[in-house]
Image (tube, grey):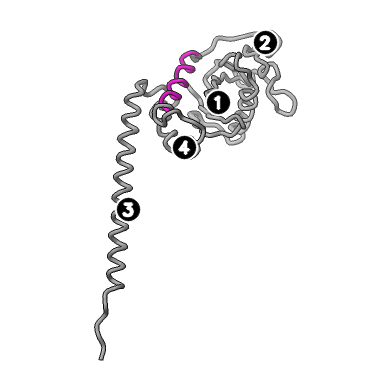
Amino acid sequence: MIKFILLVSRQGKVRLAKFYVPLGSQQKARMLRDICHVALRRGARLSNIVELNGEKYICRRYASLFFIACIDGGRPTAAVHAGADGEPPAAVAAGADDLAAADGGVGGSVSVDNELLAIEVVHHFVEVLDRYFGNVCELDLIFNFHRAYFLLDEVLLAGQLQESSKAAILETARQLDLTAEASEEASVSAERALLSTIQSTFSSPGPSSY
C-alpha cells in the first residue's frame, strides 16, 4: 500500500501531495521535511529506495520534479532516529539506503510492500501525466493541479493501484474535459442571454407622459 505520494520541485516546493493514511498535521510536516531534505540531496546514481525514520520511500527524479511515494517498510516507526536539529541521518542522504548501514550495521527485517512494484506504479503515473499534458512540466502541475489530482485518483485508490491501463485513464479524462467544456459553454450562453435581456429591458423606451 502507498501511504502517500508527493511531487516536489528542485527548490523543495511541494506541487502535489496525496495522503492515504490518517496523519496529524505536525507528523505530516515532519515527514515531508525529512524526506524532501533527503531526496533533494541524493545523487543520480543512488538507489531509488530510501529507508528513513521507520518508513520506506520510493524517490525518482523526472526532469525538474521528484516523485516520492511512501510505502510500508515493515519496520516500527522511528526505527531510524533523526540527527541533530531534527535532520535526517547523514548516512541516508549519502546513499546508505539499508537500515543496517544507517544504524551502523545493526539488524534488519523483511519488507512488507514490493518496492519494484511501487517504482512501476510511480512510473505509470508519470506516463499518464506525460500523455495527458504532452511532455508534462512543473508549470502544468501549477496551473492545472486539479487535473493532476484527478489523474492520480484514477491511478490510485486508497493507496492501491486502481487502473493499469493508460488508455482507459486518458479516455476518462477526455470525457470529463468534454463535459466540463460543454458545461462552461452552456454557462457562458446563459450569461449572455441574461445580459441581453437586461440590456433590452433598460434600453426600451418607457410610456410617454403628457
Going by the numbered disc 4, the residue's amino acid type is Phe
Q: Residues within 10 Å of mark 3 (few under 14, many from 20)?
A: few
Lower sequence index among marks 3 and 4: 4
Q: Within the magenta stretch, is there residue 119?
A: yes
Name the residue carrying label 3: 188
| Identity, as a three-letter code, of the amino acid under mark 3 | Val
Which of the 4 image quarters holds residue 47? Answer: top right
Residue at 25 percent of width and 85 percent of height: 208
Cα distance between the residues tagged 2 and 1: 24 Å
> Which mark, by number, is residue 18?
none
Counting other residues with Cα less than 10 Å from the Cα at mark 1, is it few (<14), some (14-19), or many (20 or more)? many
Residues at badges 2 and 4 in contact (C-beta under 8 Å)? no
Q: Nearer the viewer, residue 64 or 1?
A: 64
Q: Quadrant of the C terminus?
A: bottom left
Magenta-tinted stretch? 116-129
Residue 207: x %, y % from top left: 24, 82
User: Mark 2 or mark 4, which has the lower sequence index?
Assistant: 2
Question: Residue drawn at (49%, 15%), measured in percent from left and top?
Answer: 113
Q: Which residue is mark 4?
A: 145
Q: Which residue is mark 1?
A: 66
Mark 4 neighbour density, 10 Å: few (under 14) some (14–19) many (20 or more): some
| Dominant secondary structure, magenta | helix
Q: Indicate the quadrant where residue 49 lies.
A: top right
